[in-house]
Amino acid sequence: TTTTTTTTTSTSKAAAMESASLSSSASSFGFDPDLATAASALTLNATNLYELGVSEHQAMNVSWGLPMAVVTGCCYAVAANVASYVATQAERTGKSPPRTTTLLTDIAALAGYVVGGMIITVAYASGAAVPVVNATMVATNLLVNMVLQIVLGITYYNKEMRVGTMIFVVAVFQLATIGPAERGDVDIVEKFTAPLALGWTLALVIMLAVSSVLVVTTYDAPAESMHKICAWAISISVMGTATDNGASVFGMLRGVALAS
């Protein structure tokens, strides 16, 4: 917001200086200075209106980032618990669900993840801070997940689990006011070629390679295996980091850069 305001002010000053210059030039060439001044004033007003429209458009995009993160968290929670509920019921009754039910459940879960993924991608590209949007999405996902699992009887949540989840949600939602601000205008090439960025990218590539190998080697390990859990957690985290920041970058690309 500060960057946009500064840019708008600078542009308005430049337009005002140009207006005065045009009026002076018109007088020196024998044109009616009042007519030149009126034309310059129209140019200045048009410039101000354009910059105001850009500023409001950017603010509108950023303001939609957090609501879209909340919607995505709900989509992910519903998608996960639809499949979990069917699996839990089958385990409790000892009867496998009909093939049609399983197929419809998988389709519904996939649709929830796809829709949620598309919404959160737009949220990242809107200009909102990726850490704030991502944390809001995760907090919403945990809260809705807890509510659905309690209502559907999938999992029992004791007092400590409920309170812990609520504290985490409240803490994360405070990021909306105290967390990183929207990105503003950023030189992508400069940021991604900085030494720290190159080093972090290399570290992510190494972590992804190692975790991928561990995912393959622990494929047959039980679900409770800590090595398997850590391998999948690291792999998903690295891929999530890449896709989240990639989606954020898309919002800053224009023309040939976006097409390429």
Image (cartoon, rainbow, N blue to C red):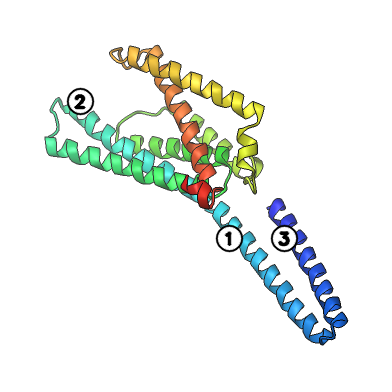
Residue toward you, 40 or 91: 40
Residue at x 36%, y 46% (from the top left corner): 115
Which callout, 3 or 2, points to the residue nearer the camera? 3
- SS at mark 2 in the image: helix
Precedes in sequence: disc 1 or disc 2: 1
Residue at numbered disc 1: 57
Residue contact between numbered discs 3 and 2, judged by CB atoms under 8 Å: no
- SS at mark 1 in the image: helix
Q: Tell me: residue 252, above or below residue 209.
A: below
Precedes in sequence: disc 3 or disc 2: 3
The mark found on residue 76 in the picture is: none
Which class describes the residues within 10 Å of circle 1: few (<14), some (14-19), or many (20+)? few
Amino acid type of the residue tagged 3 in the rendering: Thr
Q: Tell me: residue 234, above or below residue 189.
A: above
Amino acid type of the residue tagged 2 in the rendering: Glu
Residue at numbered disc 2: 91
Picture quadrant of residue 150: top left
Which class describes the residues within 10 Å of circle 2: few (<14), some (14-19), or many (20+)? few
Amino acid type of the residue tagged 1 in the rendering: His
Which class describes the residues within 10 Å of circle 3: few (<14), some (14-19), or many (20+)? many
Residue at x 20%, y 25% (from the top left corner): 91
The alpha-carbon separation of the residues under discs 3 and 1 comes to 13 Å
Residue at x 50%, y 39% (from the top left corner): 246
Residue 185 visible, this angle:
yes
Q: Is residue 9 left or right of residue 200?
A: right
Q: Is residue 134 left or right of residue 90?
A: right
